[in-house]
Image: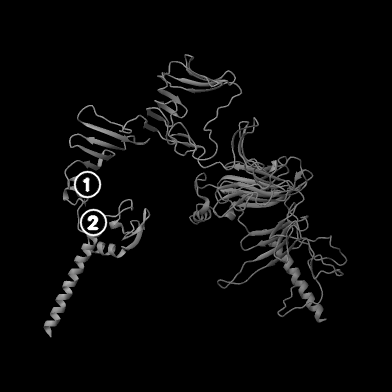
Amino acid sequence: MHFWKRLSSVLSLSFLLSTTMITTNALAADSPAEIHISSDQVAWSSAIQFREATLTVGLPDGSVFKRSFGAGDSLSFSILDAGDTQDGLYTWELTFSPVTSLRDRDTADRSDAKSTAEAVRRNEILPAAATLKDSGHFRVAGGLFVTSMDVEKTAGPRKPGERHSTNYAVDLDEPYNKQVISEDLIVDGSICVGFACEDDEVFGFDSIRHIEDNIRITAFDTSNTANFPSTDWQLTFNDSEDGGADKFSIDDITNARTPFTLLANAPSDSLYVAASGKVGIGTSVPEAQLHVTNGNTPTLGLEQDTTSGFSPQTWDIGGNESNFFIRDVTNDSALPLRIRTGAPTNSMFVDTDGSVGFGTDSPDASIHIQRTGSTGSDHAEIQTEAGGQGWKWRANAVNQQLTFIDDTASTAPFKIYPGVPSQMFVIAPTGVGIGTASPSAVLHVKKATGSITGMMTLENNSGVRFDLVNSSGGSWRTAIENMGTEYVVTKHGTGATEMRLDASGDLTVRGAITSNDGMFAATPTGVGIGTASPVAALHVLKGGGTVTGYPNHLLILQNNAATTDGAIVSIISGNANTAQLSFGDAENNFAGRFLYQHSDDSMDLQVNGADHTSFLSGEPDAIVVAAANGAHLTTGGVWTDTSSREYKTNIRELSTEDATATLEQLQPMRYNYKVDLAEEFVGFIAEDVPDLVATADRKGLSSMDIVAVLTKVVQEQQKTIDGLAAKVKALEERK
């Protein structure tokens, strides 16, 4: 009896709760839009000022209809907008873009978009995001919108013997029998709550069963102490309006929001959370933290609406048996990124330094392309195409060539073979270099090493011509003519043949080469004067006889005549002035010379126009060799360094610190000169001495420099000795 009393109390309490909860069917939200339904159109009105509104409607077959409205447009959805009319439940969502100068959307830095939007909302420029979006449902039956919007009345208590199907209107203000239980209640069995519960209800495995036409379970939190949570929640089973949704929702009553909704007939495993914490969408066996399964192209949609003041943008990330892709839905569903199924590992790899590898996870450059294999299908290629013309760079997997290909014409105008030396082809501001990075002409060809002796080859299947054209006139042409049997030099423009060399070796020159009985000869080895067999670029021979010489000599002057004078070369000035022999190279053709000066009867050695050494005539002990700085050698063999102020500049005292440091670093050594290993010397090594006494080339030393260092150190030491002596003397006088 006690059990049935408590069960009766529970049922009475549940009945009262059920009749009370129908008043919370509609959340007390400040909806931004109000819906108006007629048989052929759904319209919305809103007091929000907006610059754009977006309507998204989910159709019964799962497809989506979307439309944008500008400020002042009528917000509506026609029965014909969805194409073929479908009976069933429609879900709508309306998003408003507020009127605000939040930012210049074309140039804004989006990195602080969230904080910027929140700051604008705090200043009441931008409404709260929750007030800029609304959603709901409507239904189509028989090709027309359901318009009654009647609220289903709550069934009253059953009369004896009546079944679930009979409903009675209930006045919610009418008092019912209530029971208040002020102690714990334990029900050993099942509970049925609702006006439609039957006396002989068969529960099966149900512990709690709710039976009536409007089911709500509400949790009111009565906490009123600061910092205690007090939000009220509600579980809602189906809408109460005519044409409403068959759904299950979790409602945040306090904040007038519905964070979770599940429509009827949703597929099994629409949302599945495994024991591992992995979430499955469309699967009960999730294999990743988020696992999405669908029979046709599972896709994730990323949609930015206008509630934060930004332009709408939608991206899709999807995949199927053909590819993985990213789709720009907003811009004509363009596919900026696609990955085909079966693509190999590291098809694209972005390293920590921003380097991108294609086919490698260790890119050694900003872009590194690597293919493995050695067949024709394993080439590494970069292809470009524009206006119907294709070009391709190919690293050949078979012969390792780098080839530039005209893909449209199927030709390869440019190839680079492996092992090409550095600077083989250089384009510089001064010209094009082949074999040099510093071309000194428009085309500069240089070969430093290697067994190939050819510098340039011009090849044609008929005649070959090479023109030297001066734009002001005087141009020449060299050519191979007559099917390759003749080499011809012609005056370009006139056609006059200046030289012709045929296959037999005969040379024809327009003009004359004069020879006086073999006293002049031009041969492959050089030019001979007095000999027909020169062994130098210029070979002058007197007296005939055997011709001698040395390889690579530019000039040989040879006297084989019977004379005691030997071979004499004279450079004679036409007056009492100077005579000289000059030396130079391609960069400085007057770098040095031996110069005879008639004025002082001397021979000077000059470099770049400055005297370095002079050889003078004179009496014994007179100066016979004089250097440019005044140093000289006498006929007695005495070398004197110059030390006059007349020859010096930047004169300053040597500091004690520099002298002492230099002396400490000097390392006296014993050694032999390589040219005379028998005699031993002591001294210093020029490369190892301190900079203060080193010469510019560190090949020699000046004894005067070292003497100066020693003098300075000894002077300072003497001062120290004198000071110490004075102190000793003073100490002795005190005794």
Give the residue drawn at x 76%, y 42%.
Answer: 85
Q: Position of residue 41 (x, y in %)?
A: 70, 43
Query: In this view of the protein, which residue sits in the foreground, 667 or 51?
Result: 667
Query: Considering the numbered disc 2 on the image, is that residue within a helix, a strand or a loop?
Result: helix
Dot 1 amino acid type: Asn
Q: In which quarter of the image is residue 20?
A: bottom right
The residue pinned by badge 1 equals 629
Dot 2 amino acid type: Met
Residue 600 makes an appearance in the image: yes
Q: Coloured how?
A: one colour
Which residue is the extreme one toward the left? 733
10 Å crowding of disc 2: few (<14), some (14-19), many (20+): few
Query: Considering the numbered disc 1 on the image, is that residue within a helix, a strand or a loop?
Result: loop
Q: Position of residue 665 (x, y in %)?
A: 31, 63
Compared to residue 277, the image places residue 500 above or below, namely above
The residue pinned by badge 2 equals 704
Q: Quadrant of residue 392?
A: top right
Query: In this view of the protein, which residue sits in the foreground, 122 or 440?
Result: 440
Question: Across the whole image, how many numbered discs are drawn on residues?
Answer: 2
Compared to residue 489, the image places residue 439 above or below, namely below
Give the quarter of the figure containing the N terminus: bottom right
10 Å crowding of disc 1: few (<14), some (14-19), many (20+): some
Give the residue drawn at x 77%, y 75%.
Answer: 9
Compared to residue 488, the image places residue 108 above or below, namely below
Give the residue drawn at x 20%, y 56%.
Answer: 652
Q: Where is residue 395 in the image (x, y as percent from the top left)?
A: 62, 41
